[in-house]
Amino acid sequence: MRLTILGGGGFRVPLVYRALLADHAEGRITDVTLHDLDPGRLAAIGRVLRAQARRVADAPRVTATTDLDEALTGASFVFSAIRVHGLEGRVIDERVALDEGVLGQETVGAGGISYGLRTVPTATGIAKRVAAVAPDAWVINFTNPAGLVTEAMMHHLGDRVIGICDSPVGLGRRVAGALGVDLASVRLDYTGLNHLGWLSGVHLDGRDLLPALLADEAALGSFEEGKLFGAEWLRALGAVPNEYLHYYYSNRETVAAAQDAAQTRGVFLLEQQRRCYELLAAADREPLSTWDSVRLERDNTYMAENRRAAGVNEPDGADPNLGGYEHVALALMRAIAHDERTTLILNVRNRGTIASLDDDAVVEVPCTVDASGARPEPAGPLPEHAVGLVCAVKASERAVLHAAASGSRVSALRAMAIHPLVDSVAVAGRLLDTYRRHFPELAYLT
């Protein structure tokens, strides 16, 4: 089978290839095609992948191209992880928002809306080419904002595009660890949107273990979300939120922490990756150890501003080698290709799972996956405290989709102004105008 990776020069591609190298089962991925618009990044990541493949006799073959149709031709699966305007765009998203006193995180609030407005047209164009060149391929979307972009691509690919994220599986793993149980042995009640979900139940042998966890002060203090949100707030919710909800529940503190930081997360990653790709281009550098040291630095500084805002000084020490989205992607591909039924938390059409949203809204919920694709499993109601927030964010996403399809600046303004983390229509207008000045990709908004 052939896997095509769009954004194939991206920093995290070696994580996907590492997961593929560990899969020796019959019917595994045998060929990987990397597609990127930057030949230099493709060459650098290619060096890392070749180093990973040493001493692996059945390593998947790797080819690279800057031609999209060539990359898509013959693909069984297409993994999309593109970044329109690169990390430079993330830096602009963050800085413009923070200058207005609002959050600029790349998937949440003003920054996420800017990112979505410039990404949806490109993702839609990719979906059209997949439909034309590789109509039988399954698309696994990791491009952020993942739920929004997946919904945009579904207009052309239907249920053959499925969105993935590593946050829910990471949350499930940490909660299972705090409970002292194996993640594979429990069923998770998780409902919401991408980067906006709540874990409201952990079921083992007919028992919900979550109430006992919420009552255990020491256990709540043993994992990342317990530290971020605090035991009192988790008990008030009766659920464990996705880590990205810290931007909502502690918005004032996270904005202040970002404004006080020496540099934004985007600036840190931009400078880090520039150094990394320069080193990877040097013939005298060992590529795999170079990349791996940078990856560890990246992992250990993830959500550092949130930890500072919550008074948490150190990450929870989880093993970064446990991986995340790459293992979700591999499990998803195997389930579809070999009809190996499994359950994964994915971004799919709602189909009545969340009663307050229409059937075509993309939600992030546990799904049954087999050769026919991914279908949301029956779920309990969304927690009452979450309904308004989910509906407000989905309305903002839908306005982004309308703006991208119609070129309407008014729809883009609506998307910005109605988002819960943008507190003023006047601020929303200034944000939109400033983003339009910075990004040529937003020239279509009139």
Image (spheres, grey):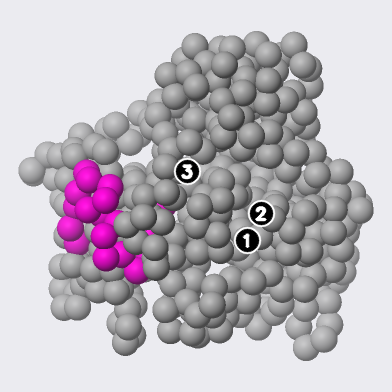
Residue 157 image point, x, y percent: 50, 57
Pointer 2 or 3: first along the chain? 3
Residue wearing tag 3: 124
Q: Measuring 32% from the left and 87% from the top, which residue is drawn there?
A: 26
- Report whether 226 appears left or right of 236: left
Q: Measuring 42% from the left and 19% from the top, which residue is drawn there?
A: 440
* Disc 1 packing (10 Å; few <14; some 14–19; many ≥20): many
Task: Looking at the picture, tell me which residue is in the foreground, 86 or 395.
Answer: 395
* Disc 3 packing (10 Å; few <14; some 14–19; many ≥20): many
Residue 113: image quadrant is top right
Residue 307: image quadrant is top right
Residue 215 image point, x, y percent: 88, 65
Q: Is residue 316 visible?
A: no
- Report whether 87 appears left or right of 2: right
Pointer 2 or 1: first along the chain? 1
Which quarter of the rendering shows the N terminus?
bottom left
Badge 2 marks a residue whose secondary structure is strand
Residue 184 image point, x, y percent: 61, 80
The amino acid at mark 3 is Thr
Badge 1 marks a residue whose secondary structure is strand
Residue 248: image quadrant is top right
Which quarter of the rendering shows the C terminus?
top right
The amino acid at mark 1 is Val
How many numbered marks have been drawn onto this rendered protein structure?
Answer: 3
Residue wearing tag 2: 362
Residue wearing tag 1: 348
Q: CA distance from mark 2 to mark 1?
A: 5 Å
Q: CA distance from mark 1 to mark 3?
A: 17 Å
Residue 257 image point, x, y percent: 65, 26
Evaluate if marks 2 and 1 touch, with contact meaning CB atoms under 8 Å apart. Answer: yes
Pointer 1 or 3: first along the chain? 3
